[in-house]
Image (cartoon, rainbow, N blue to C red):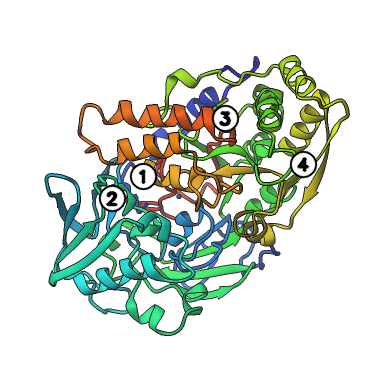
């Protein structure tokens, strides 16, 4: 792992921030586990009234992002899982180490060869409208994820041959080939159980009307503006949630986020690294929480110049990741060359420094490939300031003629992940619950973040090797890390650095659980 330049590192900053919050940190955690645009609406709050209500209820107002849809099956952004987990429960969940543990299910078991998985549901579960969450509901929810024409989780369920519900609490999944990844897979959007009444209302109803069993109920939604939710008293862990109402907003503008928190417009917000000092000076609480998020450049090998592998290779060495962290991220984050952050089972230590910054090598590769003139290139981003500008400078320094193309946040998902029309995108991989999902999203021929749509046979074989290995097998980690190495060395994705969650909150809001996999709200209170 490369080290950022001198100055306070992300780890040092996390330690300093956590030291002030340790006495109030709740470690209870429901892990339900992977960019809206528009002005946030002002609420009837006076001054710093963090509760945002005069009726005696407590309201948490979170400025981060709105989901691309309230339907887990058609969600097109990995980070949607954080918002969808407010209104949906998944069959399993992840603990702090990223291991699948029961949630809606009480237990599970595989047959000997990994081709049949039996799930046993907890009894007496209900959706937020009181309808039962039984085996039949789970069956039709999973089948919809696999079969719906517009499903974006279907590739992850491609080996799900049959779903049976032999009794009210038993669900049996028959797989076309061995796959021991399902307990983790079912901890995220793929395993979120949708109330059949919701999709029976029509193909588009769930986009704006969530139908789940999560800790909150979606009461009101204005696209690109806000969502208003209330506590779900029927939730299986309702006693762990202390706030009565939840309001969700797009990320606040970097220039105004601190003022918005001070005024009470929000009481929790995603904080740009550039605003950490300002937030602390304003008397706000700041938490820096490790996440699964890794910044990445999406490289489209179906579009020139990246249809030439030598140009892809030059790109890898042209990027000064240390500068991106120190200058673009104000020292928050760590250089990373792979999709899994340090500490995750898929992280391969052998990849440290594999594409360390070497502009001379990048220039030499391009020259040897016959590129005598600067190579025209568009660098697509939703926000050109900071890291994208640095990437542009670094590329132009080695022989590209790069310009920035800005896509509005509300259109980013469609343009980048659906149309696959961009040459190079400054992006972020939000991580996934199961390593298999990460490989599918990033590297398969159906992957949202694989715009070139090529699935290298060596990567595919390495993936098949680890998914047919039980998670508790002593060889599992070695096989998964071997697949990581093959993919990083073979596929064009250029990973940059880890991206911790930087959260600022009013002093009236207690500390968030420091969970790596998902933003969680268990035990969080507003005074």
Q: Which residue is mark 1?
A: 434
Q: Position of residue 74 (x, y in %)?
A: 48, 66
Measure the C-alpha gap from mark 1 to mark 4. 32 Å
Instruction: Tell me the quarter of the image containing the C terminus.
Output: bottom left
Element assignment for label 4: loop
- Crowding near pointer 3: few (<14 within 10 Å), some, many (20+)? many
Sequence order check: which comes first, mark 1 or mark 3? 3
Q: Is residue 511 visible?
A: no
Depth check: give the residue in front, 341 or 448.
448
**Above/below status of 461 relative to 160:** above
Tell me the number on the disc at residue 385. Answer: 4
Looking at the rendered structure, the secondary structure element under dot 2 is helix
Distance, label 1 to label 2, CA atoms, is: 8 Å
Query: Which residue is labeled 2 in the image?
Result: 182
Q: Earlier in the sequence, mark 3 or mark 4?
A: 3
Q: Marks 2 and 1: in contact by CB < 8 Å?
A: yes
Nearer-N-terminus badge (3/2): 2
- Of residues 404 and 451, the one nearer the viewer is 451
**Mark in front: 1 vs 3:** 1
State the residue at coordinates (38%, 28%): 481
Q: Neighbour class for label 2 at 10 Å: few (<14), some, many (≥20)?
A: many
Query: Which labelled disc corresponds to residue 333?
Result: 3
Instruction: Please provide percent x and percent y for residue 117.
Output: 18, 54
Is the C-beta separation of discs 1 and 4 under 8 Å?
Answer: no
Q: Is residue 78 left or right of residue 409?
A: left
Give above or below for 274 relative to 58. above
Q: Is residue 27 above or below residue 419?
A: above
At x 60%, y 37%, the residue is 296
- Name the residue nearer the viewer: 371 or 247: 371
Number of the front mark, 4 or 2: 2
């Amino acid at each position: 792992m490369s080290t950022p330049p001198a100055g306070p590192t992300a780890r040092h900053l996390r330690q300093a921030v956590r030291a002030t919050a340790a006495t109030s940190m709740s470690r209870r955690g429901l892990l339900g586990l992977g960019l809206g645009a528009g002005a946030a609406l002002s609420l009837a709050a006076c001054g710093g009234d963090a509760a945002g209500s005069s009726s005696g209820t407590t309201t948490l107002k979170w400025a981060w992002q709105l989901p691309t849809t309230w339907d887990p099956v058609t969600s097109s952004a990995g980070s949607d899982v954080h918002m969808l987990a407010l209104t949906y429960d998944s069959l399993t969940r992840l603990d702090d180490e990223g291991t699948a543990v029961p949630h809606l299910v009480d237990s599970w078991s595989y047959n000997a060869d990994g081709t049949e998985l039996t799930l046993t549901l907890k009894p007496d579960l209900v959706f937020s409208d009181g309808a039962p969450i039984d085996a039949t509901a789970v069956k039709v929810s999973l089948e919809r994820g696999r079969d719906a024409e517009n499903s974006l989780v279907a590739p992850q369920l491609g080996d799900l041959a049959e779903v049976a519900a032999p009794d009210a609490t038993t669900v049996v999944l028959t797989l076309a080939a061995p796959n021991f990844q399902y307990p983790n897979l079912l901890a995220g959007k793929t395993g979120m159980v949708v109330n059949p009444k919701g999709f029976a209302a029509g193909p588009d109803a769930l986009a704006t009307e969530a139908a789940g069993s999560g800790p909150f109920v979606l009461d009101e939604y204005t696209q690109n503006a806000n969502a208003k939710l209330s506590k779900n008293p029927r939730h299986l862990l309702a006693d762990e949630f202390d706030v009565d109402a939840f309001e969700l907003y797009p990320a606040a503008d970097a220039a105004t986020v601190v003022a918005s928190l001070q005024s009470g417009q929000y009481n929790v917000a995603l904080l740009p690294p550039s605003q950490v000092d300002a937030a602390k000076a304003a008397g706000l609480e700041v938490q820096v929480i490790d996440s699964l998020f890794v910044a990445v450049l999406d490289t489209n090998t179906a579009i020139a110049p990246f249809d030439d592998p030598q140009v892809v290779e030059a790109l890898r060495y042209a990027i000064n990741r240390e500068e991106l962290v120190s200058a673009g991220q104000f020292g928050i984050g760590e250089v990373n060359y792979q999709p899994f952050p340090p500490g995750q089972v898929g992280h391969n230590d052998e990849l440290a420094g594999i594409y360390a910054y070497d502009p001379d090598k990048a220039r030499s590769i391009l020259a040897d490939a016959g590129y005598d003139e600067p190579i025209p290139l568009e660098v697509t981003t939703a926000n050109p300031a900071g890291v994208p500008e640095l990437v542009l400078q670094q590329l132009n320094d080695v022989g590209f003629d790069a310009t920035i193309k800005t896509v509005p946040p509300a259109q980013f998902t469609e343009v980048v992940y659906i149309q696959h029309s961009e040459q190079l995108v400054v992006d972020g991989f939000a991580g996934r619950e199961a390593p298999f999902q990460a490989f599918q999203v990033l590297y398969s021929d159906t992957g949202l973040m694989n715009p070139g749509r090529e699935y290298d046979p060596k990567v595919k074989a390495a993936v098949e090797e680890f998914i047919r290995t039980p998670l508790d097998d002593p060889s599992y980690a070695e096989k998964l890390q071997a697949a990581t190495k093959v993919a990083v060395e073979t596929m064009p994705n250029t990973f940059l650095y880890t991206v911790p969650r930087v959260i600022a909150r009013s002093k009236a809001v207690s500390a968030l659980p420091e969970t790596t996999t998902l933003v969680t709200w268990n035990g969080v209170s507003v005074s």
